[in-house]
Amino acid sequence: MEFLNPFIKYDKQLLLFLHSKGNTTWDSFWIFITDPIHWVPLFFVLFLIGYKAFGIKKSALISLFTALGAISSLLIVNVIKNYIKRLRPINDESINDSIRILIETPDYSFVSGHSTVSFTIAFLFYLIFKKTYKFSIIIFLFPLLFAYSRIYLAVHFPLDILFGMFLGYIVAVLIYTLTNYVVLKK
């Protein structure tokens, strides 16, 4: 984490600023958004879009490669988290007295798994469908909401989210390359 030390102070300040904009009216909404189980219907919609564009066999393979991307992302995130060991904002004693604690989680913060996995899925979907569906960019609403929920709930710093986005992009490009070669054969 030493390479990030010059940015840590600003990262904490940005988190406190963004988190301070929250209020009890929105708390339950962001707690709902942050739970991955509530996003399952979206995955069925994505599968149906794939089915419509490519048929059952290719859409099933695309789903398999998407799952591979998500699992790969999670594994990479866990390695990074356990190596870096950055405390979550809610567990960081230098700022947690300024934070409303809405959920608790004991593991580490850097890099955000929610951000990484959701951006892996979104970038992969976008890369596969950008030529087929002109509005495929709308998929990025999902990871943006998902990622912001982590800041709102003070379980991730903004840099955790940004690096998760970047890591998700890298994994998506690698999986897309494989998917393109094996499934799409473009």
Image: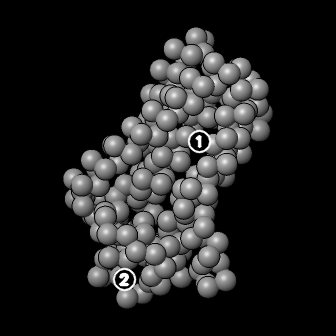
On the rendered structure, is 94 left or right of 146? left
Question: Residue 172 location in percent, x, y?
Answer: 49, 34
Residue 28 image label:
none
**Of residues 63 and 148, the one drawn nearer to the viewer in this rendering:** 63
Q: Residues within 10 Å of mark 1 (few under 14, many from 20)?
A: many
Residue at image location 44% in from the left, 28% down from the top: 174
Disc 1 is placed on an element classified as helix
On the rendered structure, is 139 left or right of 62? right
Residue at the spot of label 2: 96
Give the quadrant of the N terminus. bottom left
Question: Residue 18 location in percent, x, y?
Answer: 54, 74
Give the quadrant of the C terminus. top right
Residue 122 image label:
1
Q: Residue furthest bottom?
A: 97
- The amino acid pointed to by label 2 is Asn
On the rendered structure, is 141 left or right of 37? right
Q: Residue furthest top?
A: 185
Q: Earlier in the sequence, mark 2 or mark 1?
A: 2
Residue at image location 56% in from the left, 23% down from the top: 61
Task: Residue 110: name its quadrant.
Answer: bottom left
Residue at image location 34% in from the left, 43% down from the top: 75
Question: Residue 50 location in percent, x, y?
Answer: 69, 29
Contact? badges 2 and 1 (CB < 8 Å): no
Considering only vertical position in the picture, is 86 above or below 93?
A: above
**Of residues 123 and 59, the one drawn nearer to the viewer in this rendering:** 59
